[in-house]
Image (cartoon, rainbow, N blue to C red):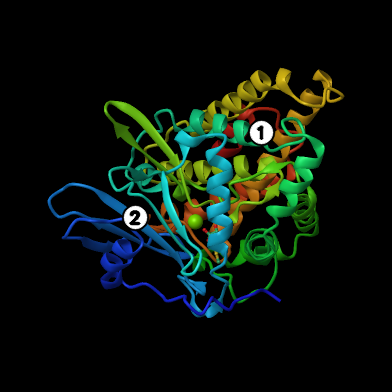
Amino acid sequence: PPHTAAPAAYRVLEPEDIPDYLRERGHWTGEAIEVHEVSDGNMNRVFVARDPGGGRSLAVKQALPWVRVAGPSWPMSPARADAEARAYRQVAAVAPDTIPAIHGYDTDNYALTMEDMSDLRVLRTHLNEGGEYGSVSRHIGTFVAALSFATSDFGMASADRKALVATSVSPELCKITEDVVLSEPYLDHEHNHWHHSLDDLAAAFRADPALRTEVAALRHIFMTSAQALLHGDLHTGSVMVGTRQGADVVRVFDPEFSFVGPIGFDLGLYWGNVLVSELRAHALGTPGDHAEQLALSWDAFEAELRRLWPARIDTFFDDAYLDRFLTQVWSESLGFAGTEIIRRVIGFAHLTDLTTLPDPGPASRRALLLGRELILRRDRLRDAAGVRVLVEE
Ligand code: SR1
Ligand code: MG
């Protein structure tokens, strides 16, 4: 069973605890600290502590012994923060500029003290308000390729890889994904909910054997395909964007779902969220070309992987195998994008992209249909132009 007990020293931090907490842990020496809670994700609490004079600032993120948005009725070990701290260390070795600076990890309270990113914006919020992508899709593609190569059997010696797979096992968090993303939306489950206009489609998806078999295949890939270390939850709420000193800044954060899994799961989550954002834009009469973002992220991913390929450790993996591998990652990414879209419409955790529309019904219906086609046609869709056709349909 999952371990839900926290260490005896564990306490749920409240905003008023943060000043002493930061001082005791040596993160803050000045007098005044202003604290406010900025929790946004489904799982954890986040506080920002600031010098009211406008000097330094820090963020503290704590895992609770339950799923934050569900409350104590959905217990969840706060030890998930160990996985997040570990993932940040692993990613820092590969792409240090793409993640926030981590100042410390408190194993008693399952709390990370890290860079305050309040000057940046959550990509989802930015897109919901009509913001441009800028360079973010390229960054995401390059990031996934760099992390994938460095933590795959291409970039690591066989024995080191086995050790990585072992230390990165994360049963409780993977089970959440296996449930809320990759099975519950296709079953009768108390977690599921949807817009009242979608009763027919939700029932049709539960009764569609072809769809369920394809989702079962993707779920099995998620459970068994230990290709590379993943972020594990790479949706547009896990990315911050903005500019600092005139340069684009992209920060990928919240890697608590990290484990060694199929690379297409990271790309697919990003794509699923990009496509839902497209459907929001369509509903508001301001269509973009978000399929272009799929192409940009894929091209950056492929270019970076091909750039790194000559440095692979095991040259039995030849160039022809790389082509085959890329084809497989492409199609799995499309399939996982489809599952991400569907679970965000009829599963547990929905997206503000759709829920804040004046009428979420029509765009949500389009999203469900798009998600289903991505899953069913993933092996036949050859490029982003093909995905664009599906979106237009
Ligand atoms: C119960 S957790 C629901 C979702 O929140 C996280 O951000 C993950 O996306 C997870 O699937
Ligand atoms: Mg998260």
Q: Is residue 102 left or right of residue 26?
A: right
- Secondary structure, mark 1, is helix
Corner quadrant of residue 328: top right
For the residues marked 1 and 2, what is the alpha-carbon distance in whole angstroms? 29 Å
Tag 2, which secondary structure? Answer: strand
Q: Is residue 299 above or below residue 256?
A: above
Out of 334 and 318, give the one closest to the viewer.
Answer: 318
Q: Foreground: 84 or 357? A: 84
Q: How crowded is mark 1: few (under 14 residues within 10 Å), some or many (20 or more)?
A: many
Q: Position of residue 160 (x, y in %)?
A: 76, 41
Q: Position of residue 5 (x, y in %)?
A: 58, 79
In the drawing, does residue 158 fall left or right of residue 92?
right
Tell me, for residue 69, which label it has, or none.
none
User: Closer to the camera, 276 or 200?
Assistant: 276
Q: Image quarter for residue 347?
A: bottom right
The answer to whether residue 100 is visible is: yes
* Quadrant assignment, res 134: top left
Q: Is residue 224 left or right of residue 245?
A: right
> To which residue does mark 2 refer?
59
Relative image position of residue 188 (x, y in whole percent)? 67, 73
Q: Name the residue under label 1.
A: 150
Q: What residue is rendered at 31% in x and 32% in y? A: 243
Q: Please identify the quadrant where the N terminus is shown.
A: bottom right
Residue type for callout 2: Ala
Vertical relation: 164 (above or below) 297:
below
Residue at the image position 67 percent from the left and 66 percent from the top: 184
| Depth order, front residue of 185/13 | 13
